[in-house]
Amino acid sequence: MARPKNVKHIFVTGGVVSSLGKGILSASLGLLLKSRGLRVAIQKYDPYINVDPGTMSPYQHGEVYVTDDGAETDLDLGHYERFLDEPTSQASNLTMGRVYKTVIDRERQGDYLGGTVQVVPHVIDAIKEKMNEQGKGGTLDVLITEIGGTIGDIESLPFLEAMRQMKLELGPKNLLNIHLTLVPYIKAACELKTKPTQHSVKMLLETGIQPDILVCRSEKPLSREIKNKVGHFCNLHESDVIGLNDCDTIYDVPLMLLNEQLDIRVLKKLSIKKYSAPELSYWRDFCNKVKHPKDGEVTIAICGKYTEYPDAYKSILEALVHTGAVNNVKVNIKLVRSEDAEENGGKSGKFLKDVDGLLVAPGFGDRGIEGKISFIRHARENNIPFLGICLGMQCASIEFARNVCGLAEANSTEFNKRCRQPVIDLMENQKKVKEKGGTMRLGSYPCILKEKTKVHQAYDKFLINERHRHRYEFNNDYRELFENNGMLFSGTSPNSELVEIIELKDHRWFVGVQFHPELKSRVRSPHPLFKGFVAAAKAYAHGERQLSLESVTLPLEEPEEG
Ligand code: GLN
């Protein structure tokens, strides 16, 4: 296939309000172009001054997505990987903080000697340098750049100015802007309203950018008349106004955009002449399974401390969608606050009585830890499928130490510095680390699995690579004691020094992992561990839960009031 000579750029901006789904739009467009035989990559530019989101609270930013090369990045990169089935990297996420850091470092080195360092041209040039970098080397046909924030934000102006200049330099056939806006439906008037979109485009025009395509999010389908009206006010032909109405699952978005011919409009505007028919049959099958699973439902409890803000668990939620589809079940999610069990005197059974599996989420700090431990105890003692991720695995180790190995004071030194039985302790190479940004054990590391274990059965191989983000680890001083009490260290680092996976021999499915399997689950390759966990929950739900309910060891429920 004849390839475009230079990489073609697509910039995705957002207007009216945030959270319209620029990430899903970018990922969906990427998937459509890839399905037509083009080589596509997606990157995200964030306007904030943090060098990366690694130091931000999940309440501020949602999940921190970790790449193979150890970058702590925006959660939209997770969508890019899940949709496109291509790895992202540090180069795929640029923040304004990183741009300023580059410029200031250069200034200190004397690169601009004699000059006044300014936003225009120095900051803009640094952004353009980065914009061009990803497209170099002839390995890409199309590079999609999602610009974080909403048009009108002061802080994203330098990104817009860099895009404006690049369009001038590269020409309109090599760079286009897709602007995502909201067309709200006003119930009282029974009407879709286009004014916010008009204003958003006006604001974009003030920065010198005429959008090439508008994608309009709305509750109801956009009629031809509305498209025509939007186009008229925004200098666009109605065929360049694409409707995107709310759908059942984010995985429907590419199919909806295909229907609206977004990909065709893009190919035409970028003068890309060689492409194939889209190959998306596997995607349709997947969506069908997500929406109409044949084998009923399971309920998974996710226990964590950020449950009011599900974006903190984005990749976990998506991995459960992927592996629900593989198991042909709908996965219902019950988010349980880890503090709830603490506040209710450790009666975690009350919260878990109608669930088929417990997942204890990653996290930092001591808030809610005792609640997590009490939930894990309930799952262990009542043979409920359990998956502990990172902090979840560490809590499972503490629970086992206290309640099975008889170490009453067992804890992690993260929660109690002077703990006398530190079954989880700071990693050796973390002990001298003072700086917080980018200093955890980050990125992909190999792990060797033991034969005849649940994890070996799930992965069906001995060597795996998984992504990490932590400072603490299992303390090897306690390995023998744990093993003597029935704990299996079913995955370790290749030199056997770091415990990466724990599992219980005499349990239906009880696995704790020090890494983050959720970050590698994709539509095309649902994660084996989640697949195994959901399969265990399904088996438990289909028959065995009722039996187990009769033999629980913890009180299940407070007497009903009244
Ligand atoms: N706080 C724990 C650590 O740093 C776990 C981190 C996590 O769950 N990602 O080791």
Image (tube, helix red, strand yellow):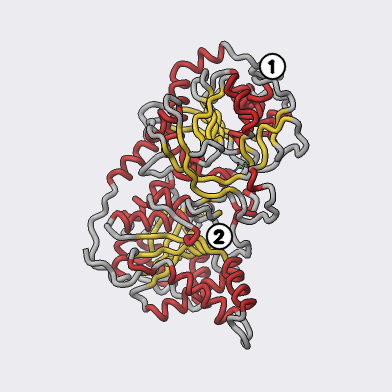
Please state the horizontal and vertical placement of residue 221, each as a whole percent of the image.
Answer: 40, 53
Residue type at mark 1 is Pro
Q: Height in image: 21 above or below 48?
A: above
Q: From the viewer's side, name the closer residue of 222 and 211.
A: 211
What residue sits right under mark 1 in the picture?
559
Q: Height in image: 480 above or below 271?
A: above
Q: From the viewer's side, name the closer residue of 160 and 130.
A: 130
Please state the horizontal and vertical placement of residue 77, each as a whole percent of the image.
Answer: 48, 54
Q: Is residue 436 left or right of residue 468?
A: right
Q: Secondary structure at mark 1?
A: loop
Q: Quadrant of the N terminus?
A: bottom left
Q: Residue at x 61, y 64 (%)?
A: 48
Say which label, 1 or 2, has the lower sequence index.
Answer: 2
Q: From the viewer's side, name the closer residue of 170 and 241.
A: 170
Q: Is mark 1 within 8 Å of ligand 1?
A: no
Q: Badge 1, how many Cα within 10 Å: few under 14, some, many 20+?
A: few
Q: Residue at x 52, y 41 (%)?
A: 516
Q: Residue 529: which quarter of the image?
A: top left
Q: Secondary structure at mark 2?
A: loop
What residue sits right under mark 2 in the picture?
17
Circle on res. 46: none
Q: Quadrant of ligand 1?
A: top right
Please state the horizontal and vertical placement of residue 346, each as a whole percent of the image.
Answer: 70, 24
Please state the horizontal and vertical placement of residue 171, each as a whole percent of the image.
Answer: 37, 78
Q: Quadrant of the C terminus?
A: top right
Q: Badge 2, how many Cα within 10 Å: few under 14, some, many 20+?
A: some
Kindly tell me whether residue 230 is visible in this rendering.
no
